[in-house]
Every structure is written in structure tokens, then in C-alpha cells.
Image (tube, rainbow, N blue to C red):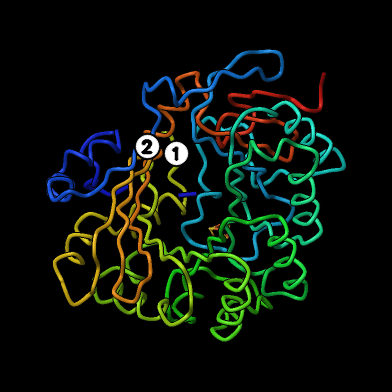
């Protein structure tokens, strides 16, 4: 998944950005505002029975079958899967799926029938275990009411997609009806990217030519969005943004998403990952303002999105590329998740369906029991 010493967002609500001078200026200029956060709009809440209890579910709603069958093929310094909340019982990244996993997922899908949702395939790297990913796609496209499923997105570092069974996986993802692929690449220079992502030995996707071949193969099947996390020493200035966009524009991708490193609340243990996030974070708003002020970058603002714990600005680059600057705030996410209404569904390897990213918390369904 996806906050600074001087937080960009003036309060603990991303919507506060909408009151900032940059947002006011953009909105006064006639920019569209896309309201994704449901707020108190009754039309945006669906009542649904799950595990014998009635809940209110936000719309839009995503389900993540959390990928954790292998340790990740990369070791990004900022990996949110290594963050620990002080009261965490178990880390989702350490749970490994067993023979029950897909039986439990079938039960989850049966219970969700009739509830509109999207599939957001993330966690650790799903493509690192091709057999698991293929079975997951088959399970999700099984006898469920497909009309309930609005989007299917895979978040990936590309390792397995560029590996020995890459073609098989790409073909399966196309059959699955993947809406788009979000591919992580945090620098246009392969050696700089490797310094940040630290792919394990033997992962060929670390190399520039292999990554470009993967982009070519994937973008022939579905839209590809590149995800770049802004960080000191990486993409951290208007010049670096310009170079990244020039590179991406030549590679046939659909969109580039620049994300700020996650903003945390005080509930996290100050481990190496949390320290990296706070020390290497590049605040999004000043960088965005600097990019907009440099007309030679060729960025034209198109719309603002207000999400339930994130906001973003969508732009168009002179090359035709869609560009998104985005930031998220875990403080707000935790507040929303504590409301007792459901904003997010995550199915973990221990068979629990939870209303958030922490196993054993906000458990909606225990598929190993009952
Ligand atoms: S690729 Fe994703 S899951 Fe893997 S280490 Fe990097 S951030 Fe974490």
C-alpha cells in the first residue's frame, strides 16, 4: 500500500486538501471534482448480509485477496508490508496460504453475491507464485455474479510477469478481463530503480531491456499504469519528473502515477521502514506546484479526486500520457475503518475476511469455522 514532517494535508482528512490554496485555485478555474469518498450520501452505502450479520458497505468497494504465498521478489525500502502497528497480533505478509485458501475464498465470494465490488489484487507480489495467481484468477471468475464486479486491477512489480511463465500469466490476466495493470517502477534508470526496489538475485525484470519487453507484451493486452513512489534520491524534483515522463511516453504506457510515500499515524512501530518513510518522503503538494509552474513540462490539470483516505490530481502530459499525483493518509484510513461501516475488504491467507489490512481485526467472516 500506499505523509511528511510538515504534512501536506492540513488536517487528518484528505478532503482538507480541497480547501488548500492549490485546490481552490484549480477548482475556481473550473476543474472537475470526482467524489469517490461516500461521505454520508445514502446512495453510496449498500446494506448487505455477511456471515449472518448486516453491514453497510461503501461504494465503490474493493476486495483484495492478499497475496502472501512467497516472500516478495523485491525488498523495497519503503514497503508498507513491513510496517507494524503497535497492537498487531500477526503480520499479513507472514501468513502463507494452505489447502483451505481457495475453499475459503469461494465462501467469501458466495457471501458477497449481489454486492457491487471491484477486485484489487495486491499484498506481496502475486506473480511470484504463478500457480497461486492462476488459481486465484480462475476462482474470482468462477460461478459468481459477474455483473457485481466492476473492475479488476493487479498491482505488480513485474517479476513473475517477466519470468519463465510470464506469457502464460499475461494471457490469463487478459482472459480474466484485467481492467489495467499497475506496474511499480520508481526510477527510469534501471540501476537507480534497483537501488530503491532491491530485486533479489536472478529477477530479470530489474534490467531495463526485460522491463521494456514486459511493458510491450502487457500493453498489447490491457492498459498499463506505471507507479512511481516519490522519494529523496529518486524522483524528487520537477526535472526528475520530466525525465520519467519522457521515458514513459516512449514506452507505450497509458498512465503514470506519482505517489507520495504513505503518511502514518502514531500507532506504528518506529522500525526501519517507518523511519525510511519519514526521512525519505518528498511532500507532494510543493512538488506538484513546482511542476505546474514549469510550463515546459507540458502538464495540464484535468480533474481532482477526493477519496476516502486519499486525494489525487489527474493531468494530461503533452505526449498524451495520463499523469496522476496522489497521496494517501493512513490516519484517515484508520478513522474511517473504525466507524463500524465497511470501506475495504481483505481476504487473508488465514481464511479471514476483514474490513481492513490487519488479520484478526474487524473480522467479517471466519471461513475456517461455521
Ligand atoms: S514490490 Fe511491493 S510488496 Fe514487494 S517489496 Fe516492493 S513494495 Fe513491498
Image location of residue 14, percent across then percent down: 30, 38
Give x and y (percent) for residue 26.
17, 50
The outermost residue toward the bottom is 209
At horizontal 63% and vertical 69% (from top left) the residue drawn is 221
Corner quadrant of residue 189: bottom left
Q: Identify the element where label 2 is drawn.
A: loop
Q: Residue at x 80, y 39 (%)?
A: 143
Q: Quadrant of residue 289?
A: bottom left
Q: Are marks 1 and 2 in contact (CB under 8 Å)?
A: yes
Q: CA distance from mark 1 to mark 2?
A: 7 Å
Q: Nearer the viewer, residue 90 or 149?
A: 149
- Image: 11 above or below 3: above
State whether residue 114 is above or below residue 289.
above
Task: State the residue at coordinates (72%, 35%).
Answer: 145
Q: Which residue is mark 2?
A: 265
Towards the viewer: 71 or 317: 317
Q: Position of residue 102 (x, y in %)?
A: 81, 41
Left or right: residue 291 versus residue 155 is left
Label 2 neighbourhood size at 10 Å, few (<14), some (14-19), many (20+)?
A: some
In the rendered image of this protein, does residue 208 appear above or below residue 219?
Answer: below
Residue 368: quarter of image: top right
Label 1: which residue? Answer: 268
For the C terminus, the image quarter is top right
Q: Residue at x 36, y 45 (%)?
A: 263
Ligand 1's quadrant is bottom right
Would you say 190 lies left or right of 249 here? Answer: right
Residue reaching furthest to the right: 99
Q: Left or right of 73: which side holds 327?
A: left
Q: Could you say whether the residue bearing mark 1 is in a helix, strand or loop? A: loop
Amino acid at each position: 500500500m500506499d505523509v511528511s514532517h510538515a504534512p501536506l494535508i492540513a488536517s487528518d482528512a484528505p478532503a482538507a486538501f480541497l480547501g488548500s490554496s492549490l485546490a481552490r485555485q484549480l477548482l475556481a478555474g473550473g476543474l472537475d471534482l470526482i467524489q469517490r469518498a461516500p461521505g454520508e450520501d445514502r446512495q453510496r452505502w449498500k446494506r448487505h448480509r455477511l456471515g449472518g450479520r448486516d453491514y453497510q458497505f461503501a461504494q465503490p468497494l474493493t476486495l483484495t485477496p492478499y497475496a502472501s504465498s512467497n516472500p516478495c521478489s523485491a525488498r523495497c525500502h519503503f514497503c508498507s508490508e513491513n510496517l507494524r502497528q503497535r497492537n498487531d497480533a500477526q503480520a499479513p505478509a507472514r501468513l502463507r496460504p494452505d489447502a483451505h485458501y481457495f475453499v475459503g475464498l469461494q465462501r467469501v465470494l458466495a457471501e458477497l453475491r449481489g454486492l457491487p465490488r471491484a477486485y484489487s489484487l495486491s499484498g506481496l507480489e502475486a506473480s511470484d507464485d504463478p500457480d497461486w495467481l492462476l488459481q486465484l484468477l480462475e476462482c474470482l471468475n468462477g460461478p459468481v455474479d459477474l455483473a457485481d464486479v466492476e473492475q479488476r486491477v493487479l498491482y505488480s512489480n513485474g517479476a513473475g510477469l517477466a519470468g519463465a511463465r510470464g506469457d502464460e500469466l499475461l494471457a490469463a490476466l487478459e482472459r480474466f478481463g484485467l481492467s489495467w495493470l499497475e506496474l511499480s517502477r520508481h526510477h527510469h534508470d534501471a540501476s537507480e530503480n534497483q537501488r530503491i526496489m532491491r530485486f533479489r538475485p536472478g529477477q530479470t525484470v530489474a534490467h531495463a531491456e526485460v522491463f521494456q519487453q514486459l511493458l510491450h507484451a502487457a500493453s498489447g493486452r490491457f492498459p498499463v499504469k506505471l507507479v512511481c513512489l516519490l522519494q529523496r534520491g529518486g524522483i524528487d524534483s520537477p526535472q526528475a519528473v520530466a525525465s520519467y515522463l519522457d521515458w514513459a511516453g516512449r514506452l507505450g504506457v497509458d498512465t503514470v502515477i506519482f505517489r507520495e510515500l504513505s503518511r502514518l499515524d502514531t500507532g506504528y512501530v518506529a522500525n526501519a521502514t517507518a523511519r525510511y518513510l519519514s526521512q525519505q518522503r518528498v511532500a507532494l503538494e510543493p512538488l506538484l506546484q513546482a511542476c505546474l509552474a514549469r510550463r515546459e513540462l507540458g502538464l495540464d490539470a484535468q480533474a481532482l479526486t477526493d477519496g476516502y483516505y486519499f486525494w489525487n490530481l489527474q493531468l494530461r502530459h503533452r505526449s498524451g500520457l495520463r499523469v496522476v499525483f496522489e497521496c494517501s493518509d493512513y490516519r484517515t484510513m484508520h478513522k474511517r475503518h473504525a466507524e463500524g461501516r465497511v470501506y475495504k475488504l481483505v481476504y487473508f491467507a488465514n481464511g479471514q475476511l476483514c474490513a481492513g489490512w490487519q488479520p484478526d481485526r474487524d473480522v467479517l467472516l471466519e471461513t475456517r469455522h461455521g
